[in-house]
Image (cartoon, rainbow, N blue to C red):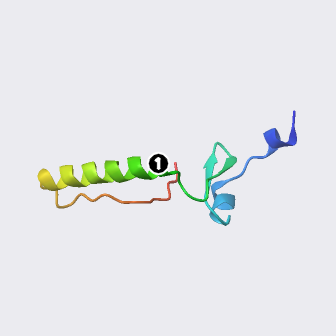
Amino acid sequence: MSIANLLNYTYEDYKNWEGDWELIDGTPISMAPAPMRIHQDIATELIFLLKNSLEKNECPDCQVSFENDWKV
């Protein structure tokens, strides 16, 4: 068994890290410094579609957020 399999980070550890990271089942995953162009294009299109749908269906209490920090 390698050392990598023994490490198990917590949400408290994650909160103190610099940079963009995800923590999946105790394993840190470093995120790319900037999304690729195709990712940006897809994200922009999804936000556009969601925003238009919410406006069309008159949902004043709904909003589309760009970035969130999730704790699952």
Q: Please name the residue that numbered disc 1 is placed on.
A: 39
> x, y (%) of residue 26?
68, 46
Residue plotted at (16% across, 56% down) = 55
Above or below 6: residue 32? below
Left or right: residue 62 compared with residue 69: left
Count of numbered labels shown in the rendering: 1
Question: Which quarter of the image is occupied by the N terminus?
Answer: top right
**Residue at disc 1, secondary structure:** helix
Left or right: residue 71 compared with residue 18: left
Q: Amino acid at mark 1?
A: His
> x, y (%) of residue 67?
44, 60
> x, y (%) of residue 4?
81, 42
Residue plotted at (44% across, 53% down) = 40
Residue plotted at (63% across, 63% down) = 15
Nearest the eye: 10 or 40: 40
Mark 1, Cα crowd under 10 Å, few <14 / some 14-19 / many 20+, is few
Residue 2 sits in which quadrant? top right
